Image: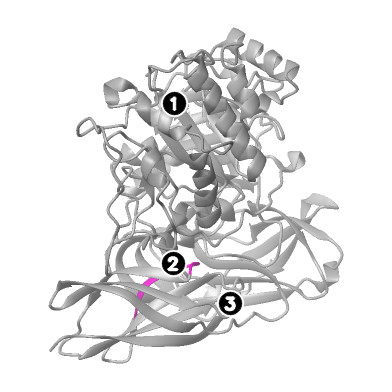
């Protein structure tokens, strides 16, 4: 457990750095990975995968309101959370999702500040950049993303020469550091996690490592998180604390991940040393290893987050994707993930349990990126067994693509009622956009208030509030949209959704101009009346200005490459030119009967289509790409035709 290298499965000792093979034609693009020697030859202009790995979602600002935290024990503005996640093996991270629903589609960003895209191994590559889907989803939620630099222990194939190559100077410059900055800029992520566990170093090598980090930070706005392994003597000696043996790495870096053996005394001394260095103790992340046991992991919580007291440091979680990898089904994954982050009761305000693991909601107040208009959510978690657009099924079959994930609800779930509490859930049986929607079910026998989103949205004379809803049959919805304002954040103003005219999706829009000058603090739902078997879905919730924007159509749709998988099946790489801002682009194939099938979507200006099948004897397949605005208006499509060989 001592090392962070359990995933480094080695196929053999690699003695010569190897440049990963570049994809060609219409093959699957993957996230980039390198050795210290091979990254020096990387050029995005000549790397055919580079265009597909770019994030187009900037890091959103987010806020915490201590008065609106769900749990009375949780604290705001103190301990942070870093999550170290391995989404796939180092060489196996698709750039833009995959045609399967099973994926670590994380939905509790409100408790995380930084995500480390974990990976690296001696047999594949030591430096791993995050793929675009993870960057997009994290940034949409105001969470930073770091790539990983991993120098494994010698028992896992590590070579000290790789470390020396990493810190090699060229005059006063560190060429590898310059490349790390270039990679982060080009792909659009925020920093690097440095894990140096290869034995054989000395004080001079350790000094060069610190100098490289300081050099990189001085020349580019990227972060560095250092892992507690290499000390200033060059030896590998896990301190489980900030000590005089490793504090030079902390002062050179933005933050430090402390190894797993910390306790009350070690964290207290770490806090005191950080303060004496003029640093915030919350830039220290006390690590826990949940790879094997998840929420059954023994953690000395009181040492880190003492009851009733200030957080001593921040928390670093190694491999929380246990909730997915250990699950028996999609529903089991969601239940495990909820217990891990929210707690055993599925209610962040009530984390009481006989288990020592209370959930992160017990300790850390929720943050929200819902700080600017338009705010639009379809409650799409970025994966599913089908894909809907405007309530119409345009694709069947599993898929995952976190670039399409909407901001999940801040509170999962907060329901207050004088009677039976209804059950909110993200439901994968129907959707207005994507593969899921919000569903509210149960016995309705009293008013229920469901708090969904914490927000900080200014209201003007043109601000609108809208929802798209669906009931099993025509009749009263017994549901109101509810918003509160910062002037009285606990008091909701409600808007009646009225009756539905059938069993299809219906839209409601409300004018908020009466509240111009105010700021929305919360968005939720409120029920009225009574119904034994209540069931309603929300497929979209939006706050926006004026009319829905219709974006300009993209231009220049081009086939960059084609791979003939069989005489009747191809994979494609496509690209186009944006004609203005877009939330994302939807791609379709036109079928012989005039209908369309969804091929995928991306915020990027390039996309990989993994499967295009010839329909009957068609001589060519028309591909269509349309822009979708942040308010979900849709442009006309740009088209191209992919020919089939007779």
Q: What kind of secondary structure does the magenta stretch mostly adopt?
A: strand
Q: From the viewer's perspective, tell me whether residue 330 is left or right of residue 503.
A: left
Task: Give the x, y percent position of residue 580.
Answer: 60, 78
Residue 196, label in figure: 1
Look at the numbered disc 3 and give the secondary structure of its residue: strand
Vertical position of residue 553 compared to residue 44: above or below: below
Look at the numbered disc 2 and give the secondary structure of its residue: loop
Vertical position of residue 313 compared to residue 170: above or below: above
Read off the magenta span.
597-604
Sequence order check: which comes first, mark 3 or mark 2?
2
Q: From the viewer's perspective, tell me whether residue 327 is left or right of residue 362.
A: left
The N terminus: image quadrant: top left
Disc 2: which residue: 434
Q: Residue furthest front?
A: 171
Residue ID at (32%, 35%): 121
Q: Which residue is more in the foreground, 122 or 354?
A: 122
Any part of residue 86 in sight: no
Q: Tell me the distance, in whole angstroms, between the alpha carbons under discs 1 and 3.
A: 54 Å
């Amino acid at each position: 457990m001592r090392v962070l290298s359990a995933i480094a499965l080695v196929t053999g000792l690699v003695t010569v750095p190897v440049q990963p093979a570049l994809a060609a034609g219409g093959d699957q693009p993957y996230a980039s990975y390198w050795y210290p020697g091979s990254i020096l030859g990387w050029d995005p202009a000549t790397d055919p995968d580079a265009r597909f790995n770019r994030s187009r979602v900037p890091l959103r600002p987010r806020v915490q309101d201590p008065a609106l935290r769900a749990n009375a024990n949780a604290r705001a503005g103190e301990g942070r959370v870093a999550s170290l996640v391995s989404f796939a093996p180092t060489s196996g991270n698709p750039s833009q999702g995959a045609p399967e629903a099973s994926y670590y589609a994380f939905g509790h960003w409100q408790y995380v500040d930084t995500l480390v895209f974990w990976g690296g191994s001696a047999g594949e590559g030591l430096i791993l950049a995050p793929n675009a889907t993870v960057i997009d989803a994290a940034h949409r939620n105001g969470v930073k993303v770091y790539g990983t630099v991993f120098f494994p222990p010698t028992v896992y194939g590590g070579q000290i020469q790789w470390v020396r190559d990493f810190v090699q100077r060229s005059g006063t410059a560190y060429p590898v550091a310059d490349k790390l900055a270039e990679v982060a800029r080009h792909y659009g992520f925020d920093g690097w996690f440095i894990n140096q566990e290869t034995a054989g170093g000395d004080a001079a090598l350790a000094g060069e490592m610190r100098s490289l980090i300081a050099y990189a930070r001085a020349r580019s706005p990227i972060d560095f998180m250092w892992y507690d392994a290499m000390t200033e003597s060059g030896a590998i000696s896990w301190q489980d604390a900030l000590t005089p043996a490793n504090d030079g790495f902390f002062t050179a870096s933005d933050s430090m991940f402390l190894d797993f053996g910390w306790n009350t005394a070690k964290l207290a001394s770490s806090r005191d040393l950080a303060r004496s260095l003029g640093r915030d103790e919350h830039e220290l992340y006390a690590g826990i290893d949940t790879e094997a046991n998840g929420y059954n992991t023994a953690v000395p919580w009181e040492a880190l987050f003492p009851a009733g007291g200030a957080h001593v440091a921040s928390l670093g979680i190694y491999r929380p994707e246990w909730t997915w990898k250990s699950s028996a089904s999609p529903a089991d994954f969601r239940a495990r993930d909820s217990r891990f982050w929210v707690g055993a009761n599925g209610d962040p305000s009530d984390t009481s349990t006989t288990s020592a693991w209370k959930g992160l909601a017990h300790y850390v107040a929720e943050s929200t990126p819902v700080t600017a208009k338009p705010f639009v959510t379809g409650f799409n978690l970025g994966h599913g067994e089908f894909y809907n657009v405007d309530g119409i099924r345009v694709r069947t079959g599993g898929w995952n693509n976190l670039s399409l994930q909407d901001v999940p609800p801040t509170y999962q779930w907060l329901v207050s009622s004088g009677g039976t509490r209804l059950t909110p859930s993200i439901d994968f049986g129907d959707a207005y956009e994507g593969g899921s929607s919000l569903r509210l079910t149960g016995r309705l026998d009293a008013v229920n208030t469901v708090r969904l989103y914490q927000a900080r949205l200014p209201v003007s004379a043109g601000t609108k509030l809208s929802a798209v809803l669906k009931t099993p049959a025509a009749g009263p919805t017994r549901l109101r949209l509810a918003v509160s304002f910062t002037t009285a954040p606990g008091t909701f103003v409600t808007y009646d959704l009225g009756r539905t005219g059938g069993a299809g999706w219906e839209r409601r829009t409300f004018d908020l101009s009466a509240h111009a000058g105010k700021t929305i603090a919360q968005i939720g739902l409120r029920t009225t009346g009574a119904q034994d078997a209540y069931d309603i879905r929300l497929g979209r919730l939006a706050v926006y200005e004026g009319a829905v924007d219709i974006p300009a159509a993209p231009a220049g749709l081009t086939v960059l490459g084609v791979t003939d998988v069989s005489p009747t099946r191809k994979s494609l790489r496509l690209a186009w030119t944006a004609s203005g801002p877009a939330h994302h682009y939807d791609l379709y194939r036109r079928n012989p009967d005039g209908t369309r099938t969804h091929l995928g979507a991306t915020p990027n200006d390039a996309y990989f289509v993994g499967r295009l099948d010839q329909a009957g004897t068609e001589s060519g397949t028309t591909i269509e790409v349309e822009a979708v605005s942040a308010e979900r208006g849709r442009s006309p499509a740009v088209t191209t035709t992919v020919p089939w060989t007779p």
